[in-house]
Image (tube, rainbow, N blue to C red):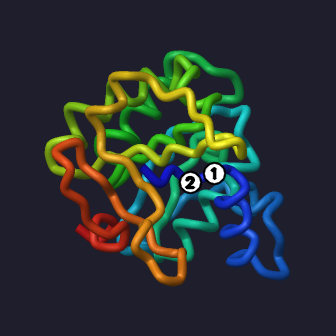
Amino acid sequence: MAIITRSQFTSFAQSKAGARGLRGVVNESRMYSKTTAITSIFLSHSHHDKSVVEEAKIFFENLGISIYVDWADQTMPESTNGATANRIKNQIISGNDKFILLATNNGVSSKWCNWEVGIADPHKLNPKKMALLPLAENSGSWNGIEYFQIYPRIEKNPYSISGSGYLVYYPDRTFETLEVWLRR
C-alpha cells in the first residue's frame, strides 16, 4: 500500500499553487460552479482539516476537476440544521458526479463524514464514482476504519518513475489511473 502522507500531499499542492499560495483558495469564491470542469467531486472532510481541504482543491483543480466543499457554499445555512443535511445529501446524490472522502484521522472519526459515506454508498459505489483519499500522518500511520476496506482508494502509484502518478485501487485488487477514474 502506498498511502499518501500529509507532507507529501502538501508538497504536491504547494508545487501546483505557485505564487498564489495555499491559504484561502477555498474561500476565493463561495459560488460553486462545475460548468468548466470535466467532472465534479463532492469532497467529504472534517472541518478540522481546512488546510488539507485547500490542498485537495488545488490537487483536483490541476486535474481539471471541480470540487464541492460544503462550508464554501454560500447557500448553506449559517448554523448546522436539517436544511444543511438535506443540501449535503442532494449534493452527494445528484449535485456532483463523484464522491471522495478525505480520509484523514479527523475525517474517519467525524460523524458527518461517516454519515456522508453512508449516503454516497448506494448512489456512487456501484457505478465506481466513490473513493477514499487516505492521508496518513507524516509518521505513516492512519487510523482507518475496517469497513472502509470495501471502498476504492486513491494512492500514489508505486510504479511511477516521476513519483507523481496516482491510482484508484479497488477492493478486488484491480486498479486504474486516477485520471481515467475521474473522467469516467
Query: Is mark 2 in CB contact (under 8 Å) with mark 1?
Result: yes
Circle 1: element type: strand
Q: Residue 169 versus residue 49: which sits nearer the camera? A: 169
Question: What's the residue type where badge 2 is placed?
Answer: Ile
Asked whether, in this view, residue 133 is left or right of residue 176, the answer is right
Question: What's the residue type where badge 1 is placed?
Answer: Thr
Q: Dividing the picture into quarters, in which one does residue 179 lie?
A: bottom left
Residue 29 visible somewhere in the drawing:
yes
Residue 84 visible somewhere in the drawing:
no
Q: Which mark is residue 5?
A: 1
Task: Check the picture and name the quadrant holding the C terminus.
Answer: bottom left
Q: Residues within 10 Å of mark 2 (few under 14, many from 20)?
A: many
Q: Dividing the picture into quarters, in which one does residue 125 lie?
A: top left
Please provide percent x and percent y for residue 172.
Answer: 16, 45
Residue shown at 53% from the left, 17% from the top: 111
Circle 2: element type: strand
Residue shown at 74% from the left, 55% from the top: 27
Q: Which residue is mark 2?
A: 4
**Taking 48 as reference, is 1 above or below it?**
below
Q: Residues within 10 Å of mark 1 (few under 14, many from 20)?
A: many
